[in-house]
Image: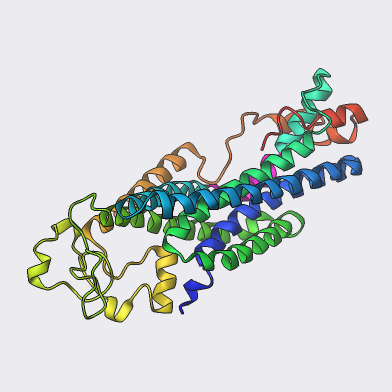
Amino acid sequence: MGSDNVFSVTAMFVMFRECMEAAVILAVLLQYVTKTGKLHLRKQVWLGAGLGFLLSLVFAVVFIIIYYTLDHEVFTGKGEAIFEGIVCIIASVMITVLAFGMLKMMELQKKWDRKLKAATLEVVETGKRKFVVTYALFIIAFTAVLREGIESVLFLAGVGVNTPWRAIPLGGAVGAVLGVCLGYVLFFGLKPVQLRWFFYISTVILLFIAAGLFMSGFGEFQEAGAFGYSAEEDEDDDGGSEDNAIAPGPSPVEEEDRFVPWQNRPLWNICKCCDDEDQGFFELARALVGYVCDPTIIQVVAYIAYWLLVLVIVAVKVKRGTLNKYKFEDEGLEKDVGAADVAADVTKGDLEAAPAGALKA
């Protein structure tokens, strides 16, 4: 049994990213409460986070039931392959967004500090009380944790197409623990800038994972026959697919190969020495960079197209100055008189009203 059958590196990275962001958001809220001296509001933060976590678990159970039903009962044969292909593509897009968000992790604390200061300053200057002011911190913590939880479930569903489901719990649990720990260290210990290269490397790994899922999605479409005749389910004496257009194994004989369209034939086949399903290192390469020992032309084109699209997105973000920074609407906030120390001077009523309005996760 390969390591990928019991521990999913992909699931670890996905859960690591999601849990780290949730941990940083909660840490910002707790530090805000501590600075203002209203320690009784900590209860709101923890209750909100706890309820968000519980509802995330409920969503996960319901989603797994629906997913399993669709994947094994509703969609069968070609329909199942198409369904899994769509899941792969969607997960690829979402993880790509997740990866670019990783670049901004160094400014996540600044983002939430600005939101809190802006909200407090608005209340002090205008005297306006916002909707649901009493439970604002509860709502923020609840929505932040629930959002990260739902995203995690959706991401792991895409990962599960190419990874045995039994490997996801352990990998996801390790990633969650590491994410929470690093989130704590980032906020109370190391400065984010000290981990800049760590964030950059993590972003690249997430992009490779997304590229592999994108390519796998097209592989599923090929298996469903979306691009013409592909591999049959029958196996030959050597253990591979009879005509082996997609599945690992020996190359098809000439008489069988002529029935497979050129776009569905493997460009190369090195599965005998570098099988991505039975050899540990290449299993890891499949999980991290999308390695396939016998890719088809369509899969290779899809992989290259994904990276070209990523380069375009990077170029656009660099031009706009938003690759690794949040674009704040109020760039002059820090120049306002006393903006950084407002929380220490407001009244109890204003303080409780402060987080509401501008504090949406």
Q: Is residue 231 left or right of residue 317?
A: left
Find residue 1 and report its horizontal and vertical position in percent.
46, 79
Quadrant where the image shows the C terminus = top right
Find residue 31 and report its horizontal and vertical position in percent.
81, 47
Q: Name the residue nearer the viewer: 72 or 302.
A: 72
Prevailing SS of the magenta stretch: helix
Does residue 306 appear in the picture of this structure?
A: yes
Look at 21% across and 51% down and name the residue there.
227
Count up the numbered dots: 0
Which quadrant of the view contains residue 187?
A: bottom right
Find residue 71 and report its horizontal and vertical position in percent.
42, 53
Does residue 204 appear in the picture of this structure?
A: no
Q: Name the residue nearer the viewer: 84 or 69.
A: 69
Look at 69% across and 56% down and name the residue there.
183
Q: Is residue 195 left or right of residue 210?
A: right
Look at 26% across and 55% down and name the residue there.
222
Q: Name the residue nearer the viewer: 328 or 242.
A: 242
The residue sitting at the front extreme is 73
Find residue 332 and report its horizontal and vertical position in percent.
68, 29
Q: Is residue 197 magenta?
A: no
Range of residues picked out in magenta? 101-113
Query: Is 281 drawn above or below residue 320 in the view shown?
Result: below
Q: Is residue 109 magenta?
A: yes
Q: Name the colouring of the figure.
A: rainbow
Q: Is residue 4 left or right of residue 112?
A: left
Look at 48% across and 54% down and name the residue there.
68
